[in-house]
Structures are given as structure tokens and as C-alpha cells.
Amino acid sequence: MQKLGDFKLPHFFNYPPYFTLQPVRETREKQIQLWKELILDYCRIQKIFVIRLEEEFPLFSNSVVERTLSHEAREAFLSALVAEGRAEWLDKGRRNCLILWHRIQEWADIIVNFVKDNGFEDSVMTVEEIRSGIESRGTELQGIDRTILVRALKLLEHKGKLAIFKGTSTDDEGVKFSV
Amino acid sequence: MSNFFSKAEVTSSGRPVLLRNEVECHLLSAVDLEPEDHRHFSLLKSGLLILTTHRLIWLPSLSASTPTSASAIPLAAISHIFSSKKSLKSVFHSPRIRFQVLVSSDGRVFDPGSESGSSSGSGSRSVVVTAVIRGKGDCDGFLVKFWDSWRARAWEATETSDSGSASASGSGAATGTGGGLYSSDGSVRMVGVAGILRKEQEMWESTDKSLQDAFQDLNALMSKAKEMVMLAEKMRQKLLSGTSSQTSGTNDEDMGSKEEMQDWLLSVGIISPVTKESAGALYHQQLSRQLADFVRIPLERAGGMINLIDAYCLFNRARGTELISPDDMLQACSLWEKFDVPVMLRKFDSGVMVIQNKSHSDEEVFARIKSLVTKPEALLTGISPTDAAMTLGIAPAMAKEHLLTAEIKGLLCRDISPDGFRFYINLFPEIDPCNMYFVKNYGICSTWIKAVSTTG
């Protein structure tokens, strides 16, 4: 089985037509499905949160069969993820895509569990501490993309589970939990 | 009322029959000829006046209500031509040419050629005739020519040469060297400066005349053409309305005459719009059958399918002459579905049109493609249209159409790369997105994996 770093690639990754955007509707739909799953899996395991279309992305090239996804194909697959709510375009030019291999709601749940597991129900923490503090090591929250984290926190704030406030330093926000 | 003027002979298309050596010099349109004493004599109204070297010919206009026959006045009968008087009255009137004509004993114009016209018969009476020119012609120019022709007396030279040639041929040549502007055979002699000038003038005159004649004919042609087009349109409308109101009571006779009508229109170059709806004009039907027969052999050679454009070229080349247009070709092929012929026209999704045998089966072609594309080498590198062409025994362009059709059916997938445009067997249907790493034991995927892994 081929590997891309630590990631195990499926057998059809070496099937050359997989890298050509198929014109026939039924075939294309299947192809898109497969790419969606593959992208999400790969990003989750490699902890990749953003894909930049104009940069090289290891998943989009296969040196064994010497094929690379065209820009059109990349955009097609990522747009399919966006349509499903598993990704978001960060800019109007569709050059950068935020990958939500966990949906925002799922992240919110993970945060709530994290808070409960560590007894932070009434505590105060900075946003940065949530993603890089000692407690988050080994959890999914370690190294989480800041944009995603803030979005999840805002969702929780909306539900009344916490409150976000400006911290002492100008660039850091703090969170008061009331889970 | 007796006819004052001599009768002029006219051809069936209304042109005057000229005497021997008679040459037309000038003409004027819309001319009335009024003999002075027209209580007794007929008045010729609004005709064409032609001046020749021998006569003044008057032709009735085509739109004359009363049929008047063509008339003529021999120049020999003219005793005097009056010069045009420019008076105050003449400014407001149509220009007039007046001349005096000798009258024979029977009261008609003296005709030197007829029986009544002998030297003794030319009486002393004369009548003044006025030609009223109502048309736009060059009246002064006509008058000048009139003078010239009358003075030249071409008819006399003709007479002498006629009588001369009866006696001895040699004497004719002898009299030719005689003096005078006209040579023995009646043509004008070109001598000296006068001759050169005369030649120039004659050239101008003949050009002028032929232009006038040409435009006469052209005008006639144009009016006839207009009539023709209107008639053809009426026919067309009738045909169109006839087929749209299709009642069950149309009998065979009607259909037959309608077809004839269509053929007639087609031969004149007017393509009937009803052709597509009805069984088609006879011409297209025959062409269609001929084409079906012809295309059999090329089809066999090409493996059962041939590009329409190729067939068109082959067919026209075989015909040699009477080439058909691309439109005719299309029509002929479209008619096949109405007949029982073993060939058919087929249009692929890409727009390419081919002729193929009715017995041709897509399924059979796909089966052959499938077996080709599941060979170990093809599993690894796919197939190109050329590979398919060689296996199927058809042209690469046709093979590509088949591959594209197979792709649409979900049998194949395309692979576009710097290596070119290739096709692989379609593995996608077998893969489950929820279980991507799972491979069915005896499916095409496992075959593919085996083929791929053996080569490393």
C-alpha cells in the first residue's frame, strides 16, 4: 500500500483517470465523492486545516503514475466539500480553503468535553492556552487552527456556555467558561 | 381605310427583316407617323422608328391596343426632307421631322421594289409625312443620319450590283471601282479622311445601336423575369397551403400533380419547402436510393462505419459530373429512414455524423472494446483511439467516437495527460466511498490491482 507520509493511500490513487476530471455525470459524481473522503481523511490525520490551491499539496500529485490534478479539478473537489459544509473558502478568489474535517459543532463539543475533563467549568483561559497549553497536548485541540477555534468558541458563547472578552494584551482574547 | 405605307416584314420576335445589305442606322421610340392627308390615310401612333440605309421602318409598340402591322417607307420614295424649324412653338411641342414622300397612282407610298413601282408609275403627287417624336431619343442626330442615308442612296448601289451579278461576275468587280461613297456590294467605301471619319462614326453608331438593342431586350427580359418569379411564388404558396390542409380526401391525382409541380420548381432552382414533410421530391428519393446502393462497398471496407464527409467525397468522385451539394447529401440520407435500406445515418453526441449498417450493433462494439481494455497492458496504460482503431478495423476518428460513446455509457474513463488522450476501464462503480480501502475479491478492481502490482 502506498503511503504519503504516515497516511495510507487507497489503491485507486494509482488509477490515472482518478486525476482527470471526468465529464460523464455519473462517473464524475463518484470521482468527487472519493476525492472528498480522501481529502478529509488526509487532512484529519495530518492535521491540515487550510489548503492553498496555488501551492503544492502532496495529495494532489502522484509521482508513481506521473499525474497531477489540474486547478479546475482541485477547485471542483473543494467546492464540493464547501457545498457539503465540510469546508469554507477563505477568500473570494477561491485560492484558500478552510477544511472542516470536524464541523464547527463537533469542535464545540470537543471543547466542552475538554473543559469538563479538566475541570475548567468556571475557569478563565486564553484562546492561545486552549490550543497550545499543557492540558491540550495529546488532544485534538492541540494545534487547532485559530480561526476554527474562535468560531467554535463563538458558537458556544451564543449558547451561553462561555463568554469571550478582550485580554490584557492587545492580541489575545480570553474565555470564561460557564459550562 | 387603306394602308398608306408599305408593309414591312417582321420576324416572330418582332424584329424587322432587313433587305440585303440593309443596315440599321438609328432608331427613335414613341414616334407617330402622320401623313398630311390623314383623312384618307391611316395614322401610325407611338411606335418604334428605325432608320436604315434603305428604308424608314415603323414598328408598332408591344402594348399597342389595335394590332397594327409593321410599316416601311423606302428612302427611294422620299423626295425631300425638311430642315427642322426652331420656333417658339417647337419648344413646347414634341420635336418633329417632316419629309415629302412620292405617292404612286394607287395613292400609297411609292415602292420601287413592288410591282406598282416602275419608273413610269412614280407619279408627280407627293404627300408630306410628319414624324412626331414623343420619346426621349436624339432627334437631331436622327435627322442628320436621315439626311446622310437618304443622300447616300444605298439602294441604288444594291440594284446595280444585283443586275450586274446576274450577267457576269466579273463585271461586278469592275463596277466596284466606280466612284461614289458606296462600293458595288452596297457597303460604304472607306477612302481618305472622309473614310476614316466615316469609319469612326459607324463604329459609334453600331455601338450605340447595339447598346440600345441590348437594353431593349434587357428590359423585356426583366419584366418577364419578374412575372416568372411571381408565378413561381404563387405555385409555392399553393403547394404549401395544399399540404398543410391535409384532408383524407386527397386523391392520387392531386398528389401526382403536386409532385410534378415540385419537380418542376426544383428544376428551375426553387427548392420546395414541402419536401421535408412529404415523401420528398422524386429527385431526392432517387438520389437516396442510389446513395444507399453506392455506399455499401465503402462501408464494408471501412468496417461498417464511415464518416459522412468521407462518403460525400467518395460519392461525388464516383459521379464525376452532376455533383450533389452537401445539402442534397443530407436530405438523401435523411430519407433512408422512410425506405427499407440496410444503411442509416447516425449522429454522435460530439456532432460527428456517420453512415453505418443497420445491422451494426453498438453492443458488439462495446464488447470488443471491453475485451481490449481489460488486457493486462491496457489495464496498466489504457488505450488510445489508434489502438482501438487497429483492433476494431475502423478509422481512428470513428474509433474515437466509439470510445467516447463507451465513456458516456460508463464503460470507460478518460485520462488526459502529457502522454495524450487515453481511455481506461471504468473502476469507479466498484469503489465504495464509505469503505475506500476495501477491494472486492473477483471484481475488476482486483484484476486491475493484480495487473498493476505484477509490473511493480
Image (spheres, grey):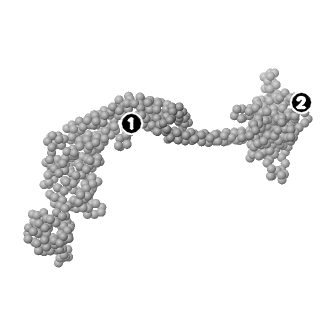
Lateral position of residue B363 relative to residue B202, left or right: left
**Chain at numbered mark 1:** B
- Where on the picture, by quarter, is residue B125? top right
Q: Earlier in the sequence, mark 1 or mark 2?
A: 2
Q: Name the quarter where the C terminus of chain A is drawn.
A: bottom left
Image mark for residue B345: 1
Chain of the residue on which disc 2 is drawn: B
Residue B157 percent across, percent down from the top left: 81, 31
How far from the left and from the top, in percent, is residue B448?
Answer: 18, 41
Residue B389 seen in the figure: no
Vertical order, B113 against B409 (above or below): above
Q: Nearer the viewer, residue B338 or A3?
A: B338
Q: In the displayed structure, does residue B261 sit left or right of residue A115?
A: right
Q: Please, is residue A24 above or below residue B263 in the view?
A: below
Looking at the image, is B182 positioned above or below residue B409? above
Identify the residue under disc 2: B121
Kindly identify the residue that appears in the image at 22 percent across and 45 percent down: B429
Residue found at the far left of this picture: A118
Q: Residues within 10 Å of mark 1 (few under 14, many from 20)?
A: many
- Front residue of B442/A44: it is B442
Residue B201, how many percent across, how many down?
74, 41
Point out residue B148 in the picture as x, y percentages from the top left corner.
80, 39
Report the residue at 19% width, 41% height from top: B444
